[in-house]
Image: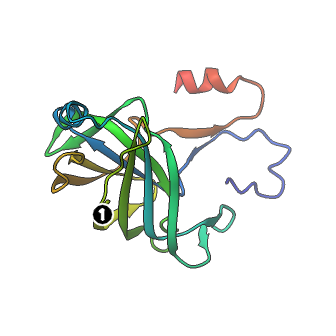
Amino acid sequence: YYDVKPGETMQPINEDITLYRPFAQLNLGTEEADWEAAVKAGVEVAETEIIVSNVYTAFSAFNDEVVGEPQKVTYKLNAKPSDALYATIDGTEQDYVYLALNYLLVGDKRNEKNLTDVEFIWKNAAGDKTNNPTTVFHNVPVQRNYRTNIVGWLLTNAAEFNITIDESFEEPDYNMIAVDGTQAAEDIAENK
């Protein structure tokens, strides 16, 4: 939020305000060759579920703080994302088949970083196959306003994967501009 000082409310305000996301993004993606091998074996993942530990369920935007105690949270079965996941591993950007995308409340202004355990569960299109046992990743680093990507061979060889933390969700990060109403916000943003 932007704190307007007394007496400023009647004056035009033109301030650059950088917005930060109060959550971390957690992505899981598999290599194209792994996806093709799974489909060839009769497994086409349609829905995914994620169970994470040590995360929060409430956030106070006014105080910029998480609320309550960290706990285990289940993100129920959802359709897998249809877009590709772009992740940079060892300086090289690569496309992965997107398996899961979730937003986690992991910290606040006092402590933005956390470690979580991630349990990954999938179900095929027919609903008759799932991964049993499930795939579990321990001590995954997560940080608010950052993306954590778990990528690799997650369907046919769950032991081969990389975990990276990306400093931004998307390039470029965006600033919010407070305007006084005399010019359209789109025009100001276009001219920045």
Q: Position of residue 164 (x, y in %)?
A: 25, 53
Number of residues whose C-alpha sits closer than 10 Å to that of mark 1, classed few (under 14), some (14–19) or many (20 or more): some
Q: Position of residue 78 (x, y in %)?
A: 51, 44
On the picture, is 168 further left or further right than 95? right
- In depth, the one of 172 and 40 nearer the eye is 40
In the image, what residue type sits under mark 1? Val
Q: Does 55 sit left or right of 16 as displayed?
A: left
Q: Which residue lies at the image location 49% right of the left edge and 74% below the top edge?
A: 110
Residue for badge 1 = 136
Residue toward you, 112 or 94: 94
Residue at image coords 75%, 54%: 4
Measuring from the top left, give residue 125's x and y in whole percent: 42, 35
Q: Is residue 33 above or below residue 50?
A: above
- On the question of residue 96 being in view, the answer is yes
Q: Quadrant of residue 137?
A: bottom left
Q: Residue at x 15, y 42 (%)?
A: 91
